[in-house]
Image (tube, grey):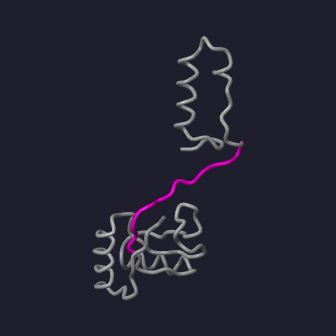
Amino acid sequence: MFIRGVSLAALMMAASSASASQSTVGHADAKLSAPAGSYQVAQACGWYAISVCSQSSKAANSAANSYGGYVLDTSSQAYPNFRPGWYCAVEGPSSKSSANRRKREMQQDGARSAYIKNGC
């Protein structure tokens, strides 16, 4: 969870540090280094079984309904190895062997061009 550019973990660490050193002036007033309004997206690393990728979210939703999974927007910073501008019907992240197994199942169900890809 992020609050105005600062992760909850960073806030908890700062609060813990401030309470542990209350006798030292300045620690409780220390500012965190993240600029106001910024945030970071966590990466979703791992292997994905992909049944269909399309520039149409409707086509990707249809494929997810047919072959399972969910629609991934490849423009998200969470998936640096995916080409931006596409919507993919995927399952994952998982191990490479699990993604391969799921890909074969998708192909047996009719997704002939199914493949696997590492998210980051």
Q: Position of residue 119 (x, y in %)?
A: 47, 66
Q: Is residue 84 left or right of residue 63?
A: right
Residue 40, magenta (yes or no):
yes
Residue 5, magenta (yes or no):
no
**Which residue occupies 37% across, 79% down?**
66
Q: Position of residue 59 (x, y in %)?
A: 50, 81
**Which residue occupies 57% across, 33% down?**
11
Which quadrant of the view contains residue 34? top right
Between 21 and 74, the one nearer to me in the picture: 21
Q: Is residue 26 left or right of residue 106?
A: right
Between 63 and 29, the one nearer to me in the picture: 29
- For the record, the magenta segment spans 36-49
**Which residue occupies 59% across, 68% down?**
75
Secondary structure mostly seen in magenta is loop
Q: Residue furthest front?
A: 24
**Which residue occupies 43% across, 79% down?**
63
Q: Position of residue 25 (x, y in %)?
A: 67, 15
